[in-house]
Amino acid sequence: MISDTCLSAPDPAAPLSKDALRAQLRRFLDEEPADDDNLMDFGLNSIAAMQIVSEWKAARVEVSFVELARCATLDALWDLLKSKSTGAA
């Protein structure tokens, strides 16, 4: 569901993984955060968050902007995506 590439939008056929999520987020961050760091502190802004939500919806993972904003760490986003997606790795 989320692509392993960090240069393009997610491939709907790709499996969901935490590493793929990390790669997707890396496109929008100034530095590499730890899994429990607040992504907003590392450069994730509202425009990037809206783009990520749009990519997830295109990959058939229904997550809202508000949900992403409430889950501002990699660990929290991973838990959210696993709960919203079927076939999580």
Image (spheres, rainbow, N blue to C red):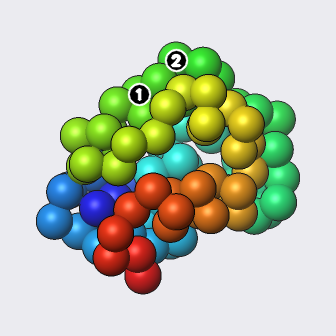
Residue 76, position as x, y percentages in the image = 71, 56
Q: Quadrant of the N terminus?
A: bottom left
Callout 2 environment at 10 Å: few (<14), some (14 to 19), or many (20+)?
few
Can I make out residue 52 in this image? no
Q: Is residue 34 left or right of residue 85?
A: right
Q: Nearer the viewer, residue 54 or 4?
A: 54
Q: What residue is drawn where x is 20% and y is 56%?
A: 11
Cβ–Cβ under 8 Å for marks 2 and 1: yes
Residue 31 image point, x, y percent = 71, 47
Relative height, residue 86 to residue 61 (above, below) = below
Residue 46 position by quadrant: top right
83 with respect to 70 (left or right)? left
**Residue 57 to residue 1: above or below:** above
Provide the residue designation for mark 1. Answer: 51
Q: Mark 1 falls on what kind of element?
A: helix
* Front position in the image: 46 or 41: 46
Q: How many marks?
A: 2
Callout 2 amino acid:
Ile
Give the residue pinned by disc 2: 47
Whether residue 69 is visible, yes or no, is yes
Q: Secondary structure at mark 2?
A: helix
Of residues 37 and 78, which is closer to you in this image?
78
Q: Classify 10 Å Cα crowding around label 1: few (below 14), some (14-19), many (20 and above).
A: some
In this rendering, the answer to whether 54 lies above or below 73 is: above
Residue at (25%, 49%) from the top-left corner? Answer: 59
